[in-house]
């Protein structure tokens, strides 16, 4: 039987399955938590502790139940509370993560390890940027409030007395995770693998147990956007100036106008409010330049243009190096004739490429309206690893359907698409390379094999570090969990 994990397929075989699966089994969850998990899968022994197994099944079925508050474990200067485990379960369930096979012991081991890293980060005087953490936390809260519908609903979800209490708890949670992440990074930052280590790693895997690589494709695209007339652009600028004057004269509130008219659906419901901004925040340069040019709270910028459209910005609050802003985004109307011209150009360019009059790459450089890809011939890069390869099974459903049946070198028909703001555009896609599903090949898949070898070496180093630090760290586990089948490192510390 084959077990598919991410883009690899493994067959069960003693320790090799565990070694190869270890990284893939835990990395996705670890990335969400901000750390690399090295505990392995922890299971309860049915023969040894049937009572505990029965006890812990109940929260798996109904994660909204809460135990009376208590301390599950102490690791150095940190405590793991019963409610921490409850909330971890609740958040997993709310996020749609399956709780099948997940036990309270699993989560206790995970949380204890996080606290061990965080504790020693403090011991080693690792410095964190608390303002950046607070900014991230504020963004997260704003997103959660939007999902939940109100701050009251969010406070009730986390069983807190007030929004301030929730903010304080989330800040400490993110701070602890950041410390743990920094500690782990410091442990493995100098770990490298040599080509010989990669070779040994790969050829020591029994041939029948080598991973299967799912079908991958390399893609290039040419994007055709309908052209907007200068008259339509000026019309939007005039409308934004009218809104600006209405606010400055006290006839309207900026947030009300944003709710009514802004085309940024992500911020519109919050009155155009964006997450806290620093000068190094990942916003469009034009947006940051205009936002930081405002001098006092209540100032409003002149209309300006970004790749997303035309904006005005309102300075809501100044908090040290951070500012809070609201914005209104509008974009010009696109005439039907401009849409038709874009379609005709797309058809014409595709015909030229098919006839061999021009290469796809040269056509992308000449005609594409997508700045990020046109200079390199339309080549797309996987945002997760900056590689040119895309796992065909991991593409979003729409793109998957557009390229699934294309062979290497084939070009799609002209595709009508929309950008993130709903504006129509056309594109053609080429599969520049297609690598069918195959057993891992040392030369063809060297980068992936190297990553696996590096992860294995990092995990060994983290385990070695943990084994040493557990011996010198105060650890206490509540009697309710003393029969959990935790790692030997933890248990040896309790004797």
Image (cartoon, grey):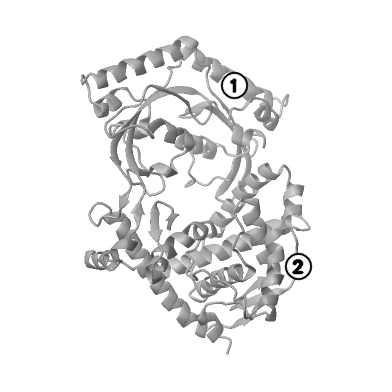
Near-viewer residue (282 or 59): 59
Would residue 341 be seen by someone viewing this image from the given angle? Answer: yes
Please name the residue shown 49% across and 11% down the image.
336
In what element is the residue under mark 1? helix
| Circles 2 and 1 in contact, beta carbons < 8 Å | no
Task: From the top left corner, tell me how far across and down residue 348 is, in percent.
Answer: 31, 15
Residue at the extreme front: 1
In what element is the residue under mark 2? loop
Residue 447 image-quadrant placement: bottom left
Q: CA distance from mark 2 to mark 1?
A: 56 Å
Front label number (2 vs 1): 2
197 sits to left or right of 252: left
Residue at the extreme bottom: 495
Up the image or down, 370 lies above or below 111; here it is above
Q: Earlier in the sequence, mark 2 or mark 1?
A: 2
Q: Quadrant of the N terminus?
A: bottom left
Residue 250 image-quadrant placement: top right
Please name the residue shown 37% across and 43% down the image.
390
341 sits to left or right of 142: left
Task: From the top left corner, tell me how far across and down residue 385 is, in percent.
Answer: 38, 49
Q: Quadrant of the C terminus?
A: bottom right
Up the image or down, 17 lies above or below 317; here it is below
Task: From the top left corner, tell me how far across and down residue 374 is, in percent.
Answer: 32, 30
Task: From the top left corner, tell me how far across and down residue 129 is, in percent.
Answer: 52, 60
Up the image or down, 160 lies above or below 372; here it is below
Near-viewer residue (314 or 202): 202
Residue 354 image-quadrant placement: top left
Q: Which residue is mark 1?
A: 241
Q: Which residue is mark 2?
A: 67
Please name the residue shown 76% across and 53% down the image.
156
């Amino acid at each position: 039987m084959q077990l598919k994990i991410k883009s690899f397929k493994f067959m069960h075989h003693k320790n090799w399955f565990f070694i190869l699966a270890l990284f893939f089994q835990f990395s996705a969850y670890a990335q969400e938590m901000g750390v690399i998990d090295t505990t392995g899968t922890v299971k309860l022994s049915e023969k040894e502790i049937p009572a505990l197994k029965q006890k812990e099944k109940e929260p798996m079925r109904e994660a909204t139940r809460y135990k009376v508050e208590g301390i599950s474990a102490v690791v150095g200067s940190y405590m793991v509370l019963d409610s921490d485990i409850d909330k971890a379960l609740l958040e997993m369930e709310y996020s749609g993560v399956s709780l099948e096979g997940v036990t309270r012991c699993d989560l206790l081991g995970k949380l204890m390890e996080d606290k061990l890293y965080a504790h020693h980060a403090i011991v080693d005087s690792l410095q964190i940027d608390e303002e950046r953490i607070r900014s991230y936390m504020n963004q997260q809260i704003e997103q959660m409030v939007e999902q939940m519908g109100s701050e009251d609903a969010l406070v009730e979800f986390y069983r807190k007395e007030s929004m301030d209490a929730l903010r304080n708890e989330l800040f400490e949670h993110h701070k602890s995770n950041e410390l743990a992440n920094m500690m782990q990074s410091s442990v493995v930052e100098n770990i490298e693998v040599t080509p010989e280590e990669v070779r040994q790693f790969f050829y020591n895997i029994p041939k029948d147990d080598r991973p299967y690589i799912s079908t991958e494709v390399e893609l290039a695209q040419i994007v055709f956007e309908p052209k907007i007339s200068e008259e339509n652009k000026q019309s939007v600028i005039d409308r934004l100036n009218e809104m600006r004057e209405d606010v400055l004269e006290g006839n309207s509130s900026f947030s009300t106008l944003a709710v009514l008219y802004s085309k940024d659906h992500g911020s519109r419901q919050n009155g155009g409010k964006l997450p806290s901004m620093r000068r190094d925040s990942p916003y469009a340069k034009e947006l940051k330049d205009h936002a930081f040019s405002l001098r006092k709270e209540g100032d409003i910028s002149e209309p300006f243009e970004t790749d997303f459209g035309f904006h005005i910005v309102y300075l809501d609050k100044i908090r040290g190096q951070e500012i809070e802003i609201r914005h209104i985004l509008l974009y010009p109307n696109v005439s039907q004739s401009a849409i038709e011209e874009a379609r005709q150009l797309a058809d014409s360019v595709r015909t030229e490429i098919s006839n061999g009059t021009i290469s796809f790459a040269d056509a992308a450089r000449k005609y594409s309206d997508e700045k990020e890809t046109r200079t390199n011939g339309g080549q797309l890069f996987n945002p997760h690893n900056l590689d040119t390869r895309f796992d065909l099974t991991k593409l979003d459903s729409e793109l998957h359907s557009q390229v699934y049946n294309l062979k290497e070198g084939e070009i799609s028909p002209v595709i009508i698409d929309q950008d993130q703001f709903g504006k129509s555009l056309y594109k053609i896609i080429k599969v520049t390379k297609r690598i069918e599903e195959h057993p891992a090949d040392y030369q063809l898949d060297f980068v992936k094999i190297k990553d696996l070898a590096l992860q294995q070496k990092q995990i060994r180093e983290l385990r070695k570090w943990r084994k040493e630090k557990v011996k010198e760290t105060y650890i206490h586990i509540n009697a309710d969990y003393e029969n959990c089948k935790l790692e030997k490192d933890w248990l040896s510390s309790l004797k």
